[in-house]
Image (cartoon, coloured by chain):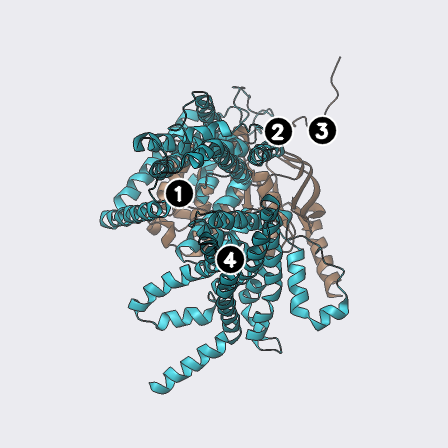
């Protein structure tokens, strides 16, 4: 007797699976029931106005928020499982760093807490690419917003991952930092990682092959970059009318 | 060159876990861990890295400690504890209780102590529902709880630290209580201190154990809350004589072991330790969402405390307790005409009507507590009047929320077509009515327990004075947080600023304490055989005048400040 396929059965190539995931804060609904599937190697951009649910959606996939209802799977596992935690990296919109560890120490300890040795060449590479070479031994508490964002990006990218979640990564970054981070995200995707980015930046949106539009917690559009562009243009025109 | 090497390194690291290679996910090896599947990286090595990071941070913190400052803080804390112990000792007195009083303590003491334990457990469970008692650093939540390390291992050390500190505090406070008991009850001081320390330690262990088990989410929270409320209910029923025995009275017996020793409570002490150990073992089930929220709020709360910003402390405390106002007011059917004629009164009524049930319950419990304390003071335990004042003051801080909201929005206040002081003063009406209602419920409780004309008459006088002074004290606390007063403080010499801070902190609750003093003069009059009502009335009059002065100060505060500033400007 063979078992019928369940919607919860993991697809080997499916990195993120959301089945009827909703989030409420008290009486306020932040995310309506969302069904979503993101395959390995996909680069997805989340677009929407403030309060549309982008950060909530990413935080749920990151395991930082618990859905009020529905099921979340990362590589077929619950998002708070060790399996998912080892494979998922999360760069939030507000950098979270220890005040008493330097940028380099952050990277070394992070890499070691994910099974590395702490002396990998990627540390120097990322420091160089993100323009942190002169500040690598300084404490993040002495940094500006942009530098803290760069440090947080370095910490998020230094560890191994197959899923990268990024929330408004370009806030406070200078042009060089922005380009460096965009390049790193692109390289991560080329390397086989799945990348989900929430942003308002139109220049960033066009670099992604798949786009999701959220509006008041609902996914109102899910399609290719071209269809996203057409959708956003129509939405702006409609808004102006 | 660098770009190419980064790409290669990234590709190599990503492909380590990528399911793209042969199309199959990495093999999962179940290890029976609560967290789920086994990570590919060696979990022990990952955890060791975490331990080394913590060690490095700890060494750095110790290296940064200013030992002179630390020694001074320890010295001042020890001195404050000593002063408190001496004062408490003076309040309690040193004359041994009569035989009948001692037997009453022996009978009811364990029940009261059991009630205290039950309330501590309830508070522990409530704290656990909000991811208490641990308050992690936000970076710990982000970097450690999201790392592939067993969460039990990540959380165990901070949890042990918090529980250990709590138990040590419980032991110290328990020993002090035991020492105070020894002054009036028969028995050796050392025995009393030992039993007090055991009781305090066991109570703290139970409370923290309950919090940890609730936070670990191994048992559904509603069940734990029901059990905690049942324990409180049993103790209350036992206290009023409706139940012959309450389970936690058994632990209460530990505090009174010098009066009569029974080995059975040792079972509860062992149980409390087991509960804490179970909680510590299962702490990995902590909700990361709640932990993150708690971390943020506790951080802000600590900062507000260091800034002596009472208003922020209260707001953050409510957020921490997830106290959200109701969407719809309970008084939504107020006629529009009434609202138009009395806008401030109506706005305040709607604010009170949006109180969540937990706040309604809290202010009534505080009112009943204050009434019981005042009755205790009436019966001869004078220091209880301080506790009564604190209870009414805290309840009034809740009742005065609409005024506080107005003070929080000075731009909106200044945009109204009426003087700001007048509007602030009008905001006092509803809080006074609320406090009178709460105090009257307390009086009703006391009258049910001891129905007599004197209780009713003295109680009615005290309801009025206590309600008005509590609101007066709370209004000083709330209104004097505003920019007018902060600006004044900046102009003052440092010699004045220190005492000003002390007075500003102590004066409002002291005012609330003054509201209960008619009870004391009535009791003195009764003791010498006089009618207690006239002296209570005589004292009530100046107290009412005092509250009236505060209410006028709320109205004319800004005018007074302006006049003083102009006078000082003219002088210079």
Report which residue position mark 1 lands on.
Answer: A125
- Is A133 or B465 nearer to us in this picture? B465
Distance from Cα at disc 1 to Cα at disc 3: 41 Å
SS for callout 2? loop
**Mark 2 Cα within 10 Å, few/some/many (few <14, many 20+)?**
many
Q: Colour of chain A?
A: brown
Asked if both marks, 2 and 4, belong to the same chain, the answer given is no
Q: Which mark is residue B532?
A: 4
Circles 2 and 4 in contact, beta carbons < 8 Å = no
**Chain where mark 2 sits:** A
Q: CA distance from mark 3 to mark 4?
A: 78 Å
Disc 1 packing (10 Å; few <14; some 14–19; many ≥20): many
- Chain under disc 1: A
**Looking at the figure, which quarter contains the N terminus of chain B?**
top left
Q: Nearer the viewer, residue B3 or A108?
A: A108
Label 4's element?
A: loop
- Label 4 with label 1: CB-CB less than 8 Å: no
The reply to whether dot 1 and dot 3 touch (C-beta < 8 Å) is no
B397 vs A50, left or right, is left
Numbered circle sitting on residue A7: 3
Disc 1 versus disc 3: nearer the observer: 3
Instruction: Say which of marks 3 and 4 sits in front.
Output: 4
Q: Which residue is at the front of the view, A184 or B335?
A: B335
Q: What color is chain B drawn in?
A: cyan
Residue A76, numbered label: 2
């Amino acid at each position: 007797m063979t078992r019928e396929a369940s919607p919860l059965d993991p697809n080997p190539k499916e990195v993120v699976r959301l089945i009827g995931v909703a989030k409420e804060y008290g009486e306020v609904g932040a995310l309506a029931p969302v069904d979503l599937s993101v395959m390995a190697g996909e680069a997805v951009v989340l677009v929407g106005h403030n309060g549309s649910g982008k950060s909530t959606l990413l935080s749920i996939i990151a395991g930082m928020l618990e859905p009020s209802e529905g099921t979340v799977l990362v590589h077929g596992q619950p998002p708070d499982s060790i399996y998912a935690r080892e494979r998922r990296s999360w760069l939030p919109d507000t950098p979270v760093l220890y005040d008493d560890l330097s940028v380099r120490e952050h990277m070394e300890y992070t890499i070691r807490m994910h099974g590395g040795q702490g002396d990998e060449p990627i540390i120097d590479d990322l420091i160089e690419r993100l323009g942190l070479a002169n500040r690598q031994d300084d404490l993040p508490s002495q940094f500006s917003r942009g530098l803290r964002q760069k440090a947080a990006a370095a910490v998020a990218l230094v560890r191994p991952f197959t899923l990268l979640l990024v929330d408004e990564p370009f806030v406070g970054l200078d042009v060089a930092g922005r380009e460096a981070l965009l390049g790193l995200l692109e390289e991560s995707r080329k390397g086989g990682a799945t990348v989900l980015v929430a942003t308002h930046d139109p220049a960033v949106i066009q670099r992604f092959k798949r786009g999701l539009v959220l509006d008041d917690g609902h996914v109102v559009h899910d399609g290719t970059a071209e269809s996203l562009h057409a959708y956003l243009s129509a939405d702006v025109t409609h808004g102006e009318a | 060159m660098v770009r190419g090497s980064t790409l290669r390194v990234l590709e190599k690291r990503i492909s380590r876990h990528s399911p793209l290679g042969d199309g199959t996910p990495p093999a999962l090896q179940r290890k029976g861990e609560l967290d789920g599947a086994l990570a590919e990286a060696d979990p022990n090595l990952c955890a060791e890295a975490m331990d080394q990071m913590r060690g490095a941070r700890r060494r750095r913190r110790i290296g940064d400690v200013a030992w002179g400052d630390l020694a001074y803080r320890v010295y001042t804390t020890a001195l404050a504890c000593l002063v408190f112990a001496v004062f408490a000792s003076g309040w309690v007195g040193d004359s041994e209780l009569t035989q009948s009083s001692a037997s009453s303590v022996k009978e009811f003491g364990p029940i009261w102590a059991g009630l205290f334990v039950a309330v501590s457990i309830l508070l522990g469970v409530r704290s656990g529902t909000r991811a208490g008692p641990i308050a992690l650093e936000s970076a710990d939540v982000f970097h450690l709880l999201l790392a592939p390390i067993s969460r039990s291992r990540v959380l165990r050390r901070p949890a042990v630290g918090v529980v250990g500190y709590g138990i040590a505090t419980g032991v110290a406070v328990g020993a002090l209580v035991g020492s105070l008991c020894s002054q009036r009850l028969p028995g050796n001081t050392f025995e009393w201190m030992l039993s007090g320390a055991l009781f305090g330690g066991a109570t703290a262990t139970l409370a923290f154990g309950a919090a940890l088990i609730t936070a670990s989410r191994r048992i559904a929270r509603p069940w734990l809350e029901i059990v905690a409320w049942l324990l409180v209910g049993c103790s209350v029923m036992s206290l009023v004589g409706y139940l012959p025995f309450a389970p936690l009275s058994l632990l209460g017996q530990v505090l009174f072991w010098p009066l009569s020793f029974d080995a059975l409570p040792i079972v509860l002490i062992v149980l409390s330790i087991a509960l804490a150990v179970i909680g510590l073992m299962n702490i990995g089930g902590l909700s990361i969402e709640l932990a993150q929220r708690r971390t943020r709020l506790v951080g802000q709360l600590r900062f507000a405390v260091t800034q002596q910003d009472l208003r922020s402390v209260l707001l953050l405390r409510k957020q921490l307790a997830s106290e959200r106002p109701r969407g719809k007011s309970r008084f939504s059917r107020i006629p529009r005409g009434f609202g138009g004629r009395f806008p401030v009164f109506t706005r305040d009524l709607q604010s009170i009507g949006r109180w969540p049930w937990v706040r309604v319950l809290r202010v009534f419990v505080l009112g009943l507590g204050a009434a019981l304390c005042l009755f205790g003071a009436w019966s001869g335990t004078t220091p209880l009047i301080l506790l009564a004042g604190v209870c009414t003051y805290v309840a009034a801080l809740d009742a005065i929320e609409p005024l506080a909201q107005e003070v929080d929005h000075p731009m909106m206040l200044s945009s109204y077509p009426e003087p700001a002081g007048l509007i602030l003063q009008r905001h006092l009406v509803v809080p006074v009515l609320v406090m009178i209602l709460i105090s009257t419920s307390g009086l009703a409780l006391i009258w049910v327990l001891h129905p007599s004309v004197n209780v009713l008459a003295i109680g009615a006088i005290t309801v009025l004075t206590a309600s008005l002074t509590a609101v007066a004290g709370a209004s000083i606390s709330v209104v004097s947080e505003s920019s007018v007063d902060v600006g004044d403080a900046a102009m003052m010499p440092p010699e004045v600023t220190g005492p000003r801070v002390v007075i500003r902190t102590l004066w409002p609750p002291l005012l609330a304490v003054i509201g209960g003093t008619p009870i004391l003069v009535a009791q003195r009059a009764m003791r010498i055989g006089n009618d207690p009502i006239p002296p209570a009335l005589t004292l009530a009059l100046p107290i009412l005048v005092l509250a009236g002065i505060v209410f006028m100060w709320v109205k004319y505060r800004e005018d007074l400040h302006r006049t003083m500033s102009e006078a000082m400007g003219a002088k210079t």
